[in-house]
Image (cartoon, rainbow, N blue to C red):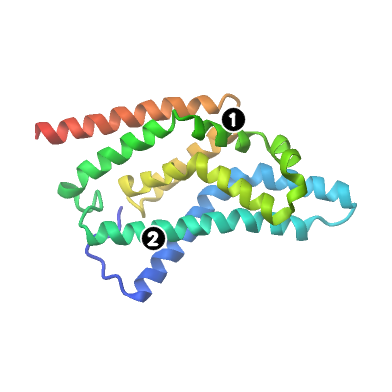
Amino acid sequence: AAMPAAASWTAAHGALMLAMWAVMMLAMMLPSAAPMILLYANIERRRRDAAPFPATAVFAAGYVVVWLAVALAATALQWWLDRSALYWPAMAGAGVPVAAVTLTAVGIYQFTPWKHACLRNCRAPLEFISRYWGQGALAIGVRHGLFCLGCCGMLMLLLFVGGVMNMVWVALIAGYVLAEKTVPGGQWLSFGAGGALILWGGRMLYAGAAG
């Protein structure tokens, strides 16, 4: 379920990990951005009375750039965890405290005002586009990507807990992100998920201390 902590980080291996993270980030985050992208395309079509694809592609590219930067940061973090023998669950003995602290930190973040300010921008595509329309397609796409990062970036740390290549775990996180942004009352999911993560992290720390 997880990459081995003893993997040899050659240039080729690093490039492979970066490609893996890039594909995974885009596969997880683009579905939740689809309502915003489709709305932007619809507005462009009506405004120009022409094919909206060039401007929409630029808008989407701005969003993609943000998450490619996240993929690069995640690759660097994975390299550091591998070097430090802290990659959990591959190094369960050393990594359990790190996993517990990660779960707790992500859970706490779910309750922060910054998280919910970013989530509101992700849940209201029309309001977001209306507010920032004059900035141009690329700038709006980057801004939306940054709000999305503020909303969901901490959740990506959970991949290091459940296993970077655990596809079930990846699908669960992607499904949660989509629900949080799109279902009615989805903003309340963050509180429930935050509480569950804090309890999980606390239980893991307690079990480790008791053991």
- 153 above or below 203? below
Q: Residue at x 35, y 71 (%)?
A: 13
As measured in the structure, the alpha-carbon distance from the residue carrying label 1 to the one carrying label 2 is: 31 Å
Residue sitting at x 27%, y 33%: 201
Q: What x and y, as percent, mark residue 2? A: 30, 54
Q: Please state if 172 lies on the left or on the right of 81 as rendered.
A: right
Secondary structure at numbered mark 1: loop
Label 1 crowd (10 A; few <14 / some 14-19 / many >=20): few
Q: Secondary structure at mark 2?
A: helix
- The tag on residue 75 is 2
Which residue is situated farthest in the right direction here? 49
Eyeballing the image, is 186 above or below 169?
Answer: above
Assign the C terminus to one quadrant of the image.
top left
Q: From the viewer's perspective, is the residue at label 1 or at label 2 nearer?
A: 2
Image quarter for residue 98? top left
**Figure quadrant of residue 43:** top right
**Tag of residue 183:** 1
